[in-house]
Image (cartoon, rainbow, N blue to C red):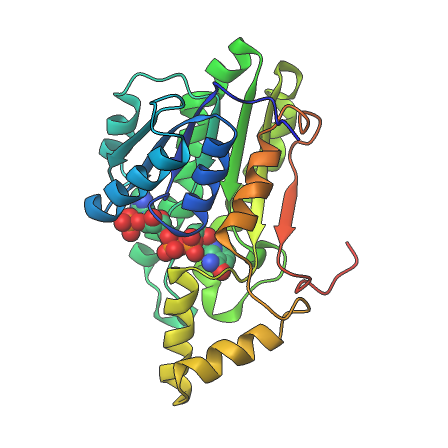
Amino acid sequence: MDLGIAGKTALVCGASKGLGYGCAEALVREGVNVVIVARGAEVLEAAAKKLAEVAGGSGNPFVKHVAADITTEAGRAAVFALGHDFDIVVTNAGGPPPGDFRNWDREAWIKAVDANMLTPIELIKATVDGMAKRGYGRIVNITSSSVKSPIDILGLSNGARSGLTGFVAGVARTSVAAQGVTINNLLPGAFDTDRLKGTMAGSAQKSGQDFDTVWEARKKTIPAKRFGTPAEFGAICAFLCSMQAGYMTGQNILADGGAYPGTY
Ligand SMILES: NC(=O)c1ccc[n+]([C@@H]2O[C@H](COP(=O)([O-])OP(=O)(O)OC[C@H]3O[C@@H](n4cnc5c(N)ncnc54)[C@H](OP(=O)(O)O)[C@@H]3O)[C@@H](O)[C@H]2O)c1
């Protein structure tokens, strides 16, 4: 299916690897120009090179990269200094650390809220009116299945991302829906990325089991009996950015291999 978005320009955050990279690659395959962002310059550069190859190496679509912390004002300013009018924005940054809420002080909460709620809101604020003026825009926030089904050790994520979810539910409907702009949240369950490997390594250490045992046991808890791939996640993201998805807004789309047990 031609998604009808060739020639559009996308900002994809947290895109040197994992789910963000999967989204960037799927968009490039559709002929979308991309600006990718992550903090670590070396991995980001390698990702940009790989994407340029996917793009066919002609510079059309273009692939640019900005090594920056997207959760800071300076990081966002570096991205907007490129001067692009973004048609598509994929918001994403690392998830907050696991732990027990009894040990989190105000600073820990502010950090989580900054990264997983206020940063996407700032990015929406900076781009949504331009999108509305041009009559097309797509914002996809990478959140988490924890928004629908909280994960006990990820209280910082449960809380901060729920704040974003409530905000998006309002802004998607009230301010820009009539101008061709959609804002949706894409909720990953368990996907095979470094983040998941890190979490599983932590669980293995805590329980005294080896990594492979914990990894395989976790898979068995998912109805699909496997982890998702960044490419699968990216394909859903690209569809949400398509012309065909113009009537879908303010939604929370779960991609979790059937793990969420509810009917609705
Ligand atoms: N994978 C899963 O199973 C899963 C499940 C539920 C939710 N999630 C959430 O989905 C998001 C993506 O996860 P992932 O699995 O793709 O993680 P990942 O493999 O660790 O990749 C994270 C990417 O974001 C970048 N990043 C992190 N913090 C950043 C910042 N402050 N500014 C700019 N870039 C930043 C990282 O590069 P640098 O570190 O170099 O900046 C990297 O490119 C996270 O919020 C995670 O909590 C993932």
Residue 106 place in picture, x, y as percent: 33, 56
Residue 165 against residue 57 in the figure, above or below: below
Q: Which residue is pictured at 43% across the width and 64% down the height?
A: 196
Residue 190 place in picture, x, y as percent: 53, 62
Which is more toward the observer, 92 or 191? 191
Residue 101 against residue 187 in the figure, above or below: below
Which is more toward the observer, 84 or 239? 239
Quarter in which the N terminus is drawn: top right
Which is more toward the observer, 42 or 203? 42
Quarter in which the C terminus is drawn: bottom right
Determine which quarter of the picture holds residue 2: top right
**Is residue 110 something one can see in this rendering?**
no
Residue 212 place in picture, x, y as percent: 44, 81
Determine which quarter of the picture holds residue 65: top left
| Residue 248 in the figure: left or right of residue 29 | right
| Residue 73 in the figure: left or right of residue 97 | left
Q: Residue furthest bottom?
A: 208
Residue 9 place in picture, x, y as percent: 43, 22
Determine which quarter of the picture holds residue 58: top left
Residue 106 against residue 212 in the figure, above or below: above
**Is residue 122 something one can see in this rendering?**
yes
Residue 183 against residue 137 in the figure, above or below: below
Q: Which residue is pictured at 54% across the width and 21% down the height?
A: 137
Q: Residue furthest right?
A: 263
Q: Which residue is pictured at 53% across the width and 36% down the height?
A: 140
